[in-house]
Each structure stands twice: as structure tokens, then as C-alpha cells.
Amino acid sequence: MGYKVVNDRPVFQLLDGDVSVWIDQEEIYMKAVDRRSRDPVELTPKEARELAAVLLEMADRTDD
């Protein structure tokens, strides 16, 4: 869990990359799919809180 650099930009990832969140051109992008089964991802409460904190931080950085 945490940030990785993908295509020269920081990308927050959970669940080995099944959930990815990044900023591009002042917009927040999120991809969430279990890459093995193509099912929706399931987050634990701890993972959901971590994702929420990252989204709030990204929103603060891109706030207009």
C-alpha cells in the first residue's frame, strides 16, 4: 500500500494496484477493479479510511 511512481507521476495504490488513484491535469482519477476476477474490489474499514484520507489530501492539492 502506498504511493508508487507510474509514468512519471505519483500513484496511490491499494491491494497490489487493484485500486489506483492519481492526479492528472488538476483532476483526480481512480481505477478500482480486481484485476484477477474483474469483480469490484472489497475494502476493509482500514483500507477505506486510508483511501478517504488520500482522496481528501489530493482534493486539497487540486482545490480551485
Image (tube, helix red, strand yellow):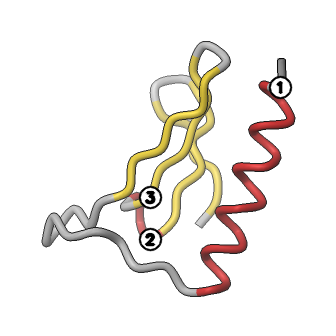
Q: In which quarter of the image is the C terminus?
A: top right
Residue 30: give its label: none
Q: Which residue lies furthest to the front in this view?
A: 64
From the image, tell me which residue sits under label 2: 15
Q: Is residue 56 left or right of residue 12?
A: right
Q: Nearer the viewer, residue 7 or 23?
A: 23
Q: Is residue 26 left or right of residue 33?
A: right
Q: Three-letter amino acid code at disc 2?
A: Leu
Residue 52 falls in which quadrant of the image?
bottom right
Disc 1 versus disc 3: nearer the observer: 1
Q: Residue 22, percent across and down?
A: 57, 37
- Crowdedness of circle 2 by 10 Å Cα count: few (<14), some, many (20+)? some
Q: Is residue 18 above or below residue 57?
A: below
Q: Three-letter amino acid code at disc 1?
A: Asp
Q: Three-letter amino acid code at disc 3?
A: Val
Q: Which residue is drawn at 38% across and 56% down?
A: 32
Q: How far apart are marks 2 and 1 (CA)?
A: 27 Å
Earlier in the chain: of badge 1 and badge 3, it is 3
- Crowdedness of circle 1 by 10 Å Cα count: few (<14), some, many (20+)? few
Q: Residue at x 79, y 49 (%)?
A: 56
Q: Residue at x 71, y 73 (%)?
A: 49
Q: In which quarter of the image is the N terminus?
A: bottom right
Q: In this view, does 54 lie above or below 51?
A: above
Q: Residue 31, percent across and down?
A: 39, 47
From the image, tell me which residue sits under label 3: 19
Q: In this view, does 44 lie above or below 53?
A: below
Q: What element carries label 3?
A: strand
From the image, tell me which residue sits under label 1: 63
Asked if the residue under mark 2 is in contact with the one under mark 3, i.e. CB atoms within 8 Å, the reply is yes
